[in-house]
Image (tube, rainbow, N blue to C red):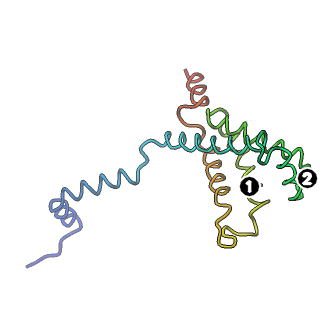
Amino acid sequence: MDQPLSMGSQAASSKNAGDQSGSFSAMLIKWCCKPCHPRWSTLSLRVLMGIVFILHGYGKLFGPNPGIEGFTGYLTSLNVVAPVFMAWLVSLVEFLGGIALLVGVATPLFASLLAIDMVFAWTLTKIGKGIIVNGVITGELDLALLAIAISLSLSGAGIWSVDAMLTKKNLQ
């Protein structure tokens, strides 16, 4: 006399048997899988990437290590065309782009420029060597910064940015 349960009956009986586990799993899925505040995630990426590029650009422009002369020499050793011009260009893009990202002004533009910077940095210094060279992991920072730059160039600055303030003002 036992009849197989239909799909609806199975779902109803499992729901009644485990209301607490059902609500817990729903809560867990909501907490783990659904973005709560995606605008905040761009803020953290933008600020962190801005700081990283300010530091790298500052070292190339003003720092004793490498400084603009040292960076020009490094680009010369890589056979980069117009190494003096490229050293200044890369240094300014990194320093000013880092500042722009930090405050969130023209984020898609500067993030795109920094993505191009990371493509060239990776291809000039890491490509052909692999991610692990002589047991040392190398190149992962360039790739992570490239991924963040692409993300920011597509998503924009998010909240707490000059871009957001200007957009909000223009929409009113």
- 137, above or below 168, in the image: below
Q: Position of residue 129 (x, y in %)?
A: 74, 69
Residue shown at 64% from the left, 66% from the top = 137
SS at circle 2: loop
Amino acid marked by disc 2? Val
- 163, above or below 4, in the image: above
Residue shown at 69% from the left, 73% from the top = 134
Residue 144 found in image quarter = bottom right
Q: Is residue 123 toward the left or the right of residue 43 in the image? A: right
Q: Is residue 51 toward the left or the right of residue 42 in the image? A: right
Q: Position of residue 143 (x, y in %)?
A: 66, 57
Distance from label 2 to label 1 (Cα)?
16 Å
Q: Residues within 10 Å of mark 2 (few under 14, many from 20)?
A: few
Residue shown at 64% from the left, 38% from the top = 101
Q: Which mark is residue 119?
A: 1
Q: Which residue is mark 2?
A: 81
Q: Position of residue 71 (x, y in %)?
A: 82, 49
Direction right: furthest residue? 82
Direction bottom: furthest residue? 1
> 166 and 93: which one is in front?
93
Direction left: furthest residue? 1
Tell me if label 2 and label 1 are in contact, CB under 8 Å: no
Residue shown at 64% from the left, 49% from the top = 150
| Quadrant placement of the N terminus | bottom left
Amino acid marked by disc 1? Val
